[in-house]
Amino acid sequence: MRVSSRQSRRVFLQRTALGTAGALLSPAIARAQPKSLTMMHESSFVPPYDAFFKNKLAAAYEKLTGIKVNYDVVSVGSLLTRVTTAAENSSGPDMTAIGFNWAFLFDDKFLDVSDIAAEIGKESGGWYDSAQESVVVNGKWKAIPFGNIGQLMNWRTDWFKQAGYDKFPDTWDELLEAGIKLKKAGHPFGFELGHGFGDNHGWLYPLLWSYGGREVEADGKTIVIDSDETARAIDFCRKFFKETMFEDVLGWTDVNNNKAFLSEQISCTNNAESILWSAKKDFPDMAKVIDQSENPKGPKGRFHMLNPLCHSIFTHTKDQKAAKDFLRWLMAPPQAGAWYDVAVTYYQPFLHAYDDAPMWKVEPRNLPYRDALKTAHLPGWPAPLSRAQSESVAKFVVVDMFAKACAGKSTKDVIADAQAQLKQIYKQA
């Protein structure tokens, strides 16, 4: 019944995208001469998402305006390299998907889209504050936020229930207690501590923040990693690692926790929606006993990682107005709503109009990803966007601080290492 309802809604949205798009365009756009635009995008984990753009949205826009929109899909992990090349050479695609703090890194290569961001926000219930954290540079919107790819707790309800837990633990200390019991029962936890690109940052930064620790003050200059709060977070992490996990996680990258969870080696990890999505497709019985929850609270609150997917327009595009008109059309409810729906909340909208959208009712277990947007931040928070922020992430300063402690190095020494690195990074910046 649920599948049938969702399919009916998808058909409705697709027809709406095709049938009402013209009303969203000014006569000038409708009379535009045929031309082409290219959007560059990293391949989505949810294949129907890419297919919908190419086969439905692009086709609808070309029929409406005569403008052909090419969808240039690049392999996972290669988008930053491609964006860098296009920016340095001032050639290539007109628009691109971006992540993290790329709006800052390529500030002078991206158009100011503040005007259409304001229109989109007004039309669709306003933007989440977290959306602006990654795209507003010197007061200007350098990208249009599309959605967050959240990182939350994925856990086995059946094994947790056997250990005496009917719901997910609310605090890190309670999760540690549960993990000790589950490991003794043969169901350890598995959280990435290696040099991956997402699942390590996805839980270690929120853990640090939840204890009140941070790398840099809001002024973006004062290094404050050496604090009692950081020390308490590290001491907890070491205990959490030793008493709930196995040593392999020190070398894990992003693929390992997914494989371990789906092969029933672990009972809990931090990940995007992909684990449940894969289980429903390949392991339907296991999918019935998987749930997803917000990160636990620490002494200073509950936090999550901001992992935004946004769209920017290169300054080198030959027809900047046409590119802005397309992004404006793309984010109008008939188009954006249908595109969100295809991915079944894998991309959590940054617009409040979608807080109670039907897509959230397709799989209620995904709702915590929506709720996590209120407490999500980029690495380096509360400092503003900067190149130093990117360098800290690229050099795994925070990840290695925790991982070295788990491997046996003293809390004092790992903090000293991290502080020395950060001082060098921010001095150079």
Image (cartoon, rainbow, N blue to C red):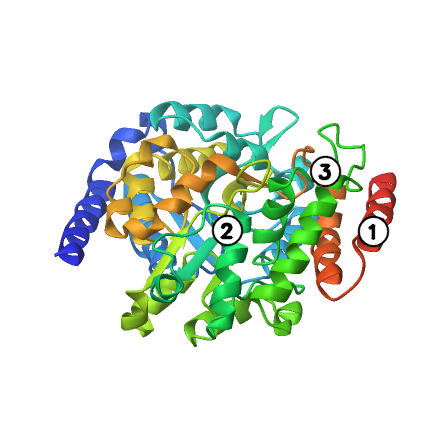
Q: Image quadrant for the C terminus? A: top right
According to the picture, the residue beneath numbered tag 2 turns out to be: 174
The alpha-carbon separation of the residues under discs 1 and 2 comes to 26 Å
For marks 1 and 2, give the one nearer the viewer.
Answer: 2
At 54% from the left and 49% from the top, the residue drawn is 172
According to the picture, the residue beneath numbered tag 1 turns out to be: 412
For the residue pair 190 and 168, the one nearer the viewer reads as 168
Q: Horizontally, is 15 left or right of 345 in the view?
A: left
Percent of width and height locating residue 297:
52, 42
The label shown at residue 386 is 3
Mark 2 and mark 3 in contact? Answer it, CB < 8 Å.
no
Instruction: Mark 1 or mark 2: name the one nearer the start of the chain.
Output: 2
At 52% from the left and 26% from the top, the residue drawn is 114
For marks 2 and 3, give the one nearer the viewer.
Answer: 2
Q: Amino acid at mark 3?
A: Ser
Q: Amino acid at mark 1?
A: Lys
